[in-house]
Amino acid sequence: MNILVTGSNGQLGSELKKIAATDQLHFWHFTDVAELDITNKDLVEGYFKANDIEACINCAAYTAVDKAEDEPQLAEKINATAVGVLADACLGNNALLVHISTDYVFDGENFKPYEESDKISAVSAYGLGKAKGEMILAGHQANSVVIRTSWLYSATGNNFVKTMLRLGSEKPEIRVVADQIGTPTWAFDLAWAIMLVVDRPDTNNAKQLYHFSNEGAISWYDFAMAIMELKKLDCKVIPIPSSEYPVKTKRPFYSVLSKEKFKKHYQISIPYWKDSLKKCMEELDGQKQAQ
């Protein structure tokens, strides 16, 4: 199968590259904005036809949550309009589109894990753009699978884990929000889940929507504490309410995603967040030793 990965220089794309390095079943095509502008319909359709793309994993996204409030049109162009462009190309090439979405399509006012059937109600420009991307696919004829995820991190790129490791080694104490609850997702685990979707032919003839993150529910404070403990950093983590950490964009107070549908369909268990965090930090340690 010819698989196209868009936004391949990001965290998730980088993990898919690791899978591709040892994969002998598929032919992989990795692009980022420099190689393929996914907002350009002619370029995208030409690329699909020239490379006979049979599955597209859309990792491309405008993810600067606060900046999106100042650039809502650009965020929507990448997170929604481009999704329609990819869907058109997939339909014309009889290809499957796997699109990555976010917990930010919800308002965060829930009291139990969000299920796929729960009504979306985004409250930020970023969330609204991602929600529109989902709605475009819902009304499109292309075969598509949407996977919502949350709190993504990895050993590459910029993310909460790497920021905490840097601050923990530089500062005697840090203040971290303790009243926002969600679940971290190791990008490697998400990449593995995506390949389950791509390799299962029964998903090619119907639209599907799944939630995927690691297991468990914690606050950003809990996450920071675990990072300091695992790395044995002598940095005090002070829990604070969101009101003491003002940001431009409202964050969901509760955005835990239910993974029951995914686990039942694929008959798998999903790693607990702390187990995956340990593996990611081991990878970071290995990178340092290799330098």
Image (cartoon, grey):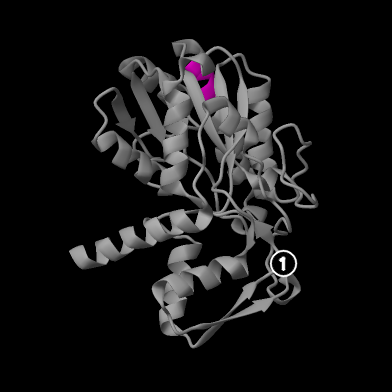
Give, as a three-letter code, the residue at label 1: Asp
Give 73 or 55, whichever is nearer the viewer.
55
Where is residue 289, by image quadrant? bottom left
Where is residue 287, by image quadrant? bottom left
Q: Is the magenta stretch mostly helix, strand or loop?
A: helix
Indicate the position of residue 12 as horizontal and vertical percent values.
43, 44
The answer to whether residue 277 shows anywhere in this view is: yes
Indicate the position of residue 76 as horizontal and vertical percent values.
62, 40
Label 1 Cα crowd, 10 Å radius (few <14 / some 14-19 / many 20+): some
Residues drawn in magenta: 85-90
Q: Residue at x 57, y 35 (%)?
A: 147
The answer to whether residue 81 shows anywhere in this view is: no
Indicate the position of residue 261 as horizontal and vertical percent values.
63, 31
Vertical arrangement, residue 270 with respect to residue 208, above or below: below
Q: What element carries label 1?
A: loop
Indicate the position of residue 40 as horizontal and vertical percent values.
48, 29
Residue labelled with disc 1: 179
Left or right side of 279 for 89: right
Give 214 or 156, whichever is nearer the viewer.
214
Give 101 or 212, whichever is nearer the viewer.
212
Vertical arrangement, residue 145 with respect to residue 222, above or below: above
Q: Which residue is drawn at 47% across and 85% down?
A: 171
Quadrant for the C terminus in the image: bottom left
Count of labels shown? 1
Q: Which residue lies furthest to the bottom in this view?
A: 172
